[in-house]
Image (spheres, rainbow, N blue to C red):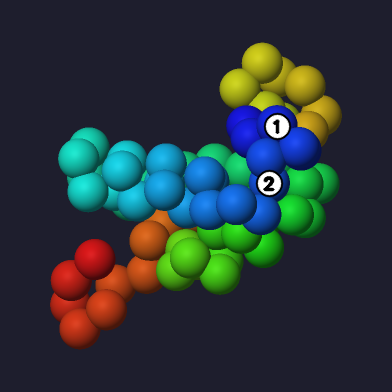
Amino acid sequence: FIDPEYRGQGIGKLLLNHAIDHFHADRLDVNEQNHQARGFYLKLGFEVIGREELDGMGQPYPLLHMRLKLVGGNL
């Protein structure tokens, strides 16, 4: 999470690009109720590929599974 005081400064994008470039991260989960985070990931090229009713702790917080979109057959 990025502290609200520092949002909009490119920190989230920098961290996400680092995860993609260095760890080949191409999938993530986001709380369905977190519209700001969902929009952030959609804007940066992710797409929703699935949904779970419960979070990883079995709580009723729906999760969206997202994947970096394929571009020209590549990520």
Q: Quadrant of the N terminus?
A: top right
In the rendered structure, find residue 3 and report the number of the disc placed on it. Answer: 1
- Work out whether residue 22 or residue 69 is closer to the camera in this orientation and state it: 22
Residue at the spot 38% in from the left edge and 61% down from the top edge: 68
Relative placement, left or right, of 70 versus 3 is left
Q: Are marks 1 and 2 in contact (CB under 8 Å)?
A: yes
Relative placement, left or right, of 11 versus 40 is left
Find numbered disc 2 in the image and state the secondary structure of the residue it sits on: loop
Q: Amino acid at mark 1?
A: Asp
55 w.r.t. 65: above or below: above
Residue at the spot 18% in from the left edge and 77% down from the top edge: 73
Q: Which residue is mark 2?
A: 7
In the rendered structure, find residue 26 and report the number of the disc placed on it. Answer: none
Residue 34, position as x, y percentages in the image: 77, 46
Q: Quadrant of the C terminus?
A: bottom left
Residue at the spot 42% in from the left edge and 48% down from the top edge: 14
Asked if residue 63 can be seen in this view, the reply is no
Asked where in the image residue 24 lies, by quadrant, the reply is top left
> How many angstroms separate mark 1 from mark 2 (CA)?
7 Å
Residue 38, position as x, y percentages in the image: 66, 56
